[in-house]
Image: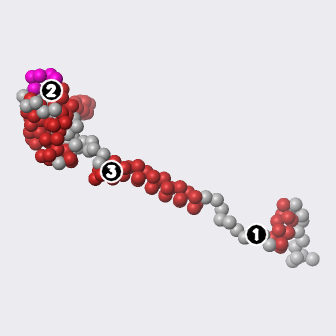
Amino acid sequence: MRRWFLPIAAACCAAGPLQAVTPAEQLRDPVLEARARKIGGELRCVVCQNQTIDDSDAPLAADLRVLLRQRLVGGDTDAQAIAFVVDRYGRFVLLKPPMEGDTLLLWWAPALMLAVGAALTFAYAKGQGGAPESAPLTDEEQARLARIIGEVPQRDEGMT
């Protein structure tokens, strides 16, 4: 029983989005249906928010699919059909919002975050790099270093 669970679960997950557009919703004209599928893949389900209206089983997504197909049958161009849905539900329904003044932050935020992160990483690494600078050696320290390097035997002052 356990060995069949994963394949059945995977098949159910894969089949879910495929059944979202029901045969009753599909148009008889294959060209119009292809246009509807293309546009449906660009519109976000307002309920699910992470699925297209073609992938969602939500009742509102089904209503949007029917509405979209009615607009196309009525003679709307792709742009007019999308504009109608956007006018009704706002630009949130677009999976890829246009690059305009109020969406620039949305488009540029990932690059800005990456740049800030790189700058902070560079500044941190630069601050951590290398040994701290020290004052120059005194004459006594230089003489002691010369004895150590030259392996000059030291005379212990405690022994006479």
Q: How is the image coloured?
A: secondary structure
Residue 32 position in % (x across, y down): 14, 26
Q: Along the polypeptide, which appears first: circle 2 or circle 1?
A: 2
Q: In front of the other: label 2 or label 1? A: 2
- Which residue is pictured at 89% across the width and 65% down the height? 153
**Residue at 27 percent of width and 42 percent of height:** 96
Instruction: Give the magenta-colored segment's residue range.
Output: 27-33
Q: Quadrant of the N terminus?
A: top left
Circles 1 and 3, Cβ within 8 Å, touching? The answer is: no
Q: How many labels does the image show?
A: 3
Near-viewer residue (4 or 123): 123
Residue behind mark 2: 33
> Mark 2: which secondary structure?
helix
User: Is residue 16 visible to us here?
Assistant: no
What residue is pinned by disc 1? Answer: 136
* Secondary structure under the numbered disc 1 in the rendered image: loop
69 lies left or right of 116: left
Viewer-nearest residue: 80 or 125: 80
Disc 3 marks a residue whose amino acid type is Leu
Alpha-carbon span between mark 1 and mark 3? 54 Å
The answer to whether residue 31 is magenta is yes
54 relative to 122, above or below: above
Instruction: Find residue 104 and name its label.
Output: 3
Horizontal and vertical percent for residue 129?
61, 58
> Of the residues shown, which amino acid type is indicated by label 2?
Glu
Question: For residue 81, which quarter of the picture?
Answer: top left
Which-is-in-front pick, marks 1 and 3?
A: 3
Front: mark 2 or 3:
3
